[in-house]
Amino acid sequence: DGLTMVPVASYNDINSKIEQGTKQRTVAATQMNATSSRAHTIVAITFSQKGKNEQSGQNTTKTSVINLVDLAGSERADSTGATGDRLKEGSAINQSLSCLGNVIKALADASSGKGQVLVSFRDSVLTKLLKNALGGNSKTVMIAALSPADINYEETLSTLRFADRAKSVKTTAVVNESPTDKLIRELREENARLLGQLKAAKGDPKALAALAAQLSGGDNDSLEKGDNKRGIDEAEVEAMKKEMEERLKRNQEEVEQMKKTWAERLKEEEAASKLREEELKNEHKMKKTTAHLWNLNEDPQLTNMIIHFLKPGKYHIGNKKRNPPPEILLNGLSIQKDHAVIEHDGNTNKIKIVSNKKAKVVCNGIILVDECELRHGDRILFGNNHLFVLHHPKDADLLKKKEDAKKQGKTFEEVLPTFNQAQEEIAQNSGLINNGNKGDHKDGKMSSQDLLLQEDLLKVIPMINEANAMSEELDKKVAFEPVLISPQARGEKEGKTEVKVKMRDLTNDNEWIWDKNKFINRNFIMQEMYQNFTDGYPDWNVAKEKDPFWEAPDADVLIGSVHLYLQSLAYKIEFEETLAITDFKGNDIGQLFVQIMPCEASGEAVSEDEYVEDPAELVNSKCDKNLVTLTTTIK
């Protein structure tokens, strides 16, 4: 849906269209609150050669389509060290790659003569677009990107298997040469036939399945048998109807395009391109003279893709529920109907932001509770995901810096903030990471361990904020917070401090400590659940066992640790003591009664006569004379 075909006159035009498509993709990803622009990229270049057949005298068209496909790599949980919980199964990249793998396997089976095979091209957008390139009149070349690193062994093996399977698909390429008038007539006839079949089916699953099989290139009998076996639900029926309607629409567009001459189509596209170039030039000029907000994103490709100009006036910020619609529309978690208002005074050139008290607005890392004046370079976070930077060319401080640089004969070069810097600022002001204090480091620099710890915190804090917002909106009654666990608190003698996530049940105050990777994987599933909720799916709220916000009450939890010194054993002395159980914060949360008694191999206690004055006496003695019994009681 929304795909367009545009005429081009040169290879430079093709490059221009590829760049335009890349920008549109990244903008779309930003508006959907994506943290990455990673996606499959398909560039389809159609070459058409029109002429007159010398023998028949008919106008003919030779057509060739080159599909340049860049497949995004699949995400594997093992690569992140994740165990237990799996990554979100419904991720678009993994799902479409799985569908592509199924199609290639089916085509390979068909090529090897395994009888009737169902080729499910309609299972994903990717396979729909590549239908003709994979199983039709085509030649296919796959270039696999491999890594020699041992940690990528599984991915490399999977990629090689994928490429080997693709190599098994047998295709035959022949020249596509058809009379132009005949093509138009055939398209019209196909439209009439599809309309007739669509009306005749009237929701009949078998008839729709047969028609869908014709469109997808699958085997009709196999499809009917499979569907009879598993049944066709209403969603599939609607999907089939939609697919046929799209086919009708595409056919009609092709008829209209073929009626036009190449010169007419090229002229229209040149006019549209000039208009787009003019708009880009105007936007570039406005950026230099007009105050505006530009977005910051974790993925550099998505940064500075969304621009909101702030001419003198008032700008309401909110979600799509606001009536009338806000001047700056934001979607996603924690965005209120009336989130905030930005006012730009044209007389004083001052810009201020007024926050709704119920809304989350963070300015330069500090939560905004009322209003404040915005200056050039300020970082503003709306909700949990929308991070913007203010560019104010008429800001007094900016003008002064430019003037000072000019007096010194220098060119003013502005250092733009990055996403990581903005997140670090938010974390510092919340007290979650070191606020410029280097502690006991004599050289004033943080150790490599501290830097890694801070990096982990910066990665997990935005996810925790997102999880808390989703929990509140879905009424899950749980809260998350980051915790730092020392090796001693984990019962280890040495090691490094680790970032973990504490989940607290707000109804009964039960607490669980999750490993960072477990939380990240759960967060993917939370996002999927929230997306289903916002899309209005009735079954969004899954069973407890599959709920990412739920943990079994009887799950093993490390509540604390006890330090037990065994020095008395070196003297073969009985030891009895009540020791404090401390949590990861060092707070006493219980007591552990410990009794250690040296004993013989038979289990009998050693006599007092075997008391050792010097532990060196135990060297080279038999182990069965140095056994102990340990008795513990938790209070």
Image: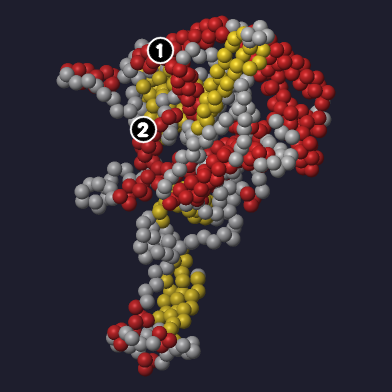
Question: For the point 59% across and 50% down, which residue is it?
Answer: 550
In the rendered view, tell whether residue 549 sits above or below residue 615.
above
Residue 246 percent across, percent down from the top left: 68, 22
- Tag of residue 418: 2
Residue 92 percent across, percent down from the top left: 57, 36
| 476 sits left or right of 120 in the view | left
Question: For the point 40% across and 46% down, which residue is it?
Answer: 457
Mark 1 in CB contact with mark 2 (< 8 angstroms): no
Q: Which of pointers 1 and 2 lies earlier in the amino acid sequence?
A: 1
Q: From mark 1 to mark 2, how far is it between C-alphas? A: 25 Å
Question: For the point 42% across and 58% down, which residue is it?
Answer: 584
Residue 576 percent across, percent down from the top left: 42, 79
| 454 sits left or right of 437 in the view | right
- Tag of residue 21: none
Q: Which secondary structure, mark 2? A: loop
> The residue under label 2 is which amino acid type?
Thr
In the rendered view, tell whether residue 557 sits above or below residue 602.
above
User: Which of 574/272 is in front?
Assistant: 272
Circle 2 residues within 10 Å: few <14, some 14–19, many ≥20: some
Residue 323 percent across, percent down from the top left: 59, 20
Q: Quadrant of the N terminus?
A: top right
> The residue under label 1 is which amino acid type?
Lys
In the rendered view, tell whether residue 169 sits above or below residue 592.
above
Q: Which residue is mark 1?
A: 281
Question: For the point 47% across and 19% down, which residue is it?
Answer: 14
| 279 sits left or right of 505 in the view | left
